[in-house]
């Protein structure tokens, strides 16, 4: 009589269940995912911002690479700087490639809509415990009130022109600052903050390198005509609005220095927070970082 095959005992675990990491062997160190992630983030924060600025500054002093950086990266931030400055003065504007059309008169409807959006965003961010975003929206709201009610139309148009390279510095700084968003933010989970870091560094260095060199040599200032859009921004500021060349250079250089100082403070604070999180990966500092 043929013997029956042995019975197979049913597995207690499903064949295709969720993967469970193996337990470490006795006597070996446990792998702490939060600590490893935090340590890697700290190493990247030490190098990322200085390296991005250094590379962009070097490219800004080259030939063809500088032209490509301006075409594909900094030009869009420059035109956005014109547009944002115009919006804060209740002047409708739309940033485009190499040229930003701006309305010749204020639109009070546009200004009221923008103020409503900024106020709503500030309240929403505050209730969601996003203090930085709430403060930023509040500052923009105050700037819009000043630009709309305190500045004459001519003065508003004057600062809108200044806002091109100024926007490269300020908006570029804000883009680089996204590197330090908190854990769990959508910019932290994805790769957007790294792209913003590159774009912001390119925009900032492209503009600031020009005005830094202009301290000693006014010939580096891009006076003249832009093809299809009329006089360049420096030509308009000097020719139409009577700015002294030295004062114009000084204003751009001081603004860029303030942006660098703000980045320096953010860099130090970001490293300190990460160092605390590395030392205490299960602490409140790690959860808030």
Image (cartoon, rainbow, N blue to C red):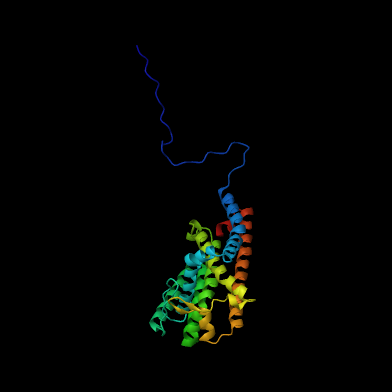
The answer to whether 33 appears left or right of 110 in the picture is right
Q: Quadrant of the C terminus?
A: bottom right
The answer to whether 119 appears left or right of 267 in the picture is left
Q: Position of residue 8 (x, y in %)?
A: 40, 26
Looking at the image, which is closer to me, 17 or 249?
A: 249
Residue drawn at point x = 62 percent, y = 70 percent: 261
Q: Quadrant of the N terminus?
A: top left
Residue drawn at point x = 42 percent, y = 32 percent: 11
Q: Is residue 41 above or below residue 132?
A: above
Is residue 142 visible from the viewing direction of this image? no
Q: Position of residue 140 (x, y in %)?
A: 50, 76
Q: Position of residue 7 (x, y in %)?
A: 39, 23
Residue drawn at point x = 53 percent, y = 62 percent: 198
Is residue 191 visible from the viewing direction of this image? yes
Q: Is residue 205 above or below residue 281?
A: below
Give the farthest residue toward the left.
Answer: 1
Q: Is residue 44 above or below residue 149?
A: above
Looking at the image, which is closer to me, 31 or 90?
A: 90
How many numbered marks appear?
0
Q: Is residue 195 above or below residue 7?
A: below
Q: Position of residue 13 (x, y in %)?
A: 43, 36
Give the farthest residue toward the top.
Answer: 1
């Amino acid at each position: 009589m043929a013997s029956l095959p042995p019975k197979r005992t049913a597995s207690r675990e499903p064949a295709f269940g969720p993967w469970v990491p193996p337990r470490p062997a006795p006597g070996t160190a446990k792998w702490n995912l939060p600590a490893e992630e935090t340590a890697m983030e700290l190493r990247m924060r030490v190098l990322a911002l200085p390296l991005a600025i250094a590379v962009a500054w070097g490219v800004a002093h080259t030939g063809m690479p500088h032209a490509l950086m301006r075409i594909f990266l900094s030009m869009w931030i420059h035109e956005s700087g014109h547009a944002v400055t115009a919006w804060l003065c209740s002047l409708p504007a739309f940033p485009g490639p190499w040229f930003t059309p701006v309305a010749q008169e204020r639109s009070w409807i546009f200004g009221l809509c923008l103020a409503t959006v900024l106020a709503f965003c500030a309240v929403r961010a505050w209730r969601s415990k996003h203090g930085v975003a709430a403060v930023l929206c509040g500052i923009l709201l105050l700037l819009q009130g000043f630009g709309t009610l305190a500045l004459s139309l001519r003065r508003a148009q004057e600062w809108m022109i200044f806002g091109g390279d100024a926007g490269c510095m300020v908006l570029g700084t804000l883009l680089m600052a996204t590197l330090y968003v908190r854990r769990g933010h959508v910019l932290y989970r994805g790769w957007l903050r790294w792209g913003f870091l590159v774009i912001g560094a390119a925009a900032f260095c492209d503009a600031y390198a020009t005005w830094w060199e202009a301290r000693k040599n006014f010939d580096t200032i891009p006076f003249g005509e832009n093809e299809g859009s009329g006089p360049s921004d420096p030509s308009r500021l000097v020719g139409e609005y009577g700015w002294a060349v030295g004062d114009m250079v000084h204003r751009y250089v001081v603004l860029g220095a303030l942006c660098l100082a703000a980045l320096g403070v953010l860099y130090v604070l970001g490293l300190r927070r990460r160092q605390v999180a590395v030392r205490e990966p299960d602490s409140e500092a790690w959860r808030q970082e």
